[in-house]
Image (cartoon, rainbow, N blue to C red):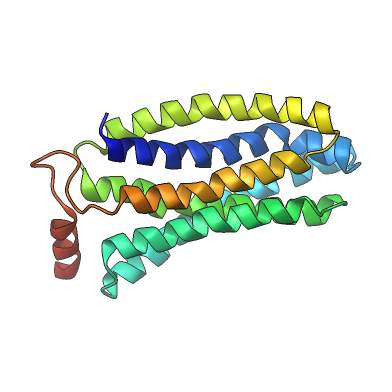
Amino acid sequence: VLPRVWGFTWVHLAMNFIYLVLLAWVPFYLHNDLGASMEVTSVLSTIPFAGMAAGSFSAGLVADFMLQRGVPTKSVRRIIMAVATFTPALAMVALTQMTTPVPAVACIVVALTTLAVSSAGFHAYLQDIAPKLSGRIVGFTNTVGTLFGFFGTALTGFLHDATGSFHAVFLITGAVCASAWFAFYVATMSDAPLLANYGSMDSVDASTDEQ
């Protein structure tokens, strides 16, 4: 596996980590730690994932707008990924200070909505640089990322039992998510295609200019 692919794998791994941890543990967190009733928990737990749909769709519109205005493709992807990594990380830090369900869910909404904008960053970039390989690359990175996400959900249970709260989990999750931007930045330093004859960033920007 090429070194850059390992960089993209870490990006996918980090995003899966925060997503799967929240997917698995938000209902328990709201009910057990914050005292929300099961009825309230069942409603509040769905809101962040609705936000993901809005975030992903909106990011695509914003990214296309920036490309049409002549912003270089790589810059667009990096800006999008900065939003998709640093904002959820900050939301996780803020979540450690929440003591009631509604503000906590607001933090989770921010985290997952902005995490979802990565569809116009990381995922789109792989199609930019390797349109004929992107399916295989994402298949590989998602497999590794999902396996690590399973580890994250198990680790969450152990840490909660050991500490009696989710504070450590949220801080670790935020740090892992933030690290994805640095991995993405390093992996995108080269404009060369992942394999010869599969296109390059120069051809991507040229095609964008023609549209």
Counting from the top left corner in percent of width and height, residue 109 is at: 66, 53
Which image quarter: residue 202?
bottom left
194 in relation to 136, above or below: below
Picture layout, residue 114 above or below residue 131: below
User: Which residue lies at the image location 69% right of the left edge and 49% below the top edge?
Assistant: 47
User: Which image quadrant is residue 10 in?
Assistant: top left
Q: Residue at x 70, y 44 (%)?
A: 170
Q: Quadrant of the C terminus?
A: bottom left
Identify the residue shown where x is 19% and y is 56%. 201
Q: Is residue 204 visible?
A: yes
Name the foreground residue: 85 vs 132.
Answer: 85
Where is residue 8? Give x, y as percent: 37, 41
Residue 54 in view: no
Residue sitting at the far left: 197
Whole-percent x and y of residue 197? 8, 42
Asked where in the image residue 75 lies, by quadrant, the reply is bottom left
- Residue 81 vs 183, above or below: the answer is below
| Residue 142 percent coordinates (x, y) | 42, 31
- From the viewer's perspective, is residue 15 above or below residue 88? above
Viewport quadrant of the N terminus: top left
Toward the viewer: 109 or 191? 191
> How many numbered dots are placed on residues in this image?
0
85 on left or right of 95 = left
In the picture provided, is 193 more to the left or to the right than 89? left
In the image, 187: left or right of 152? left
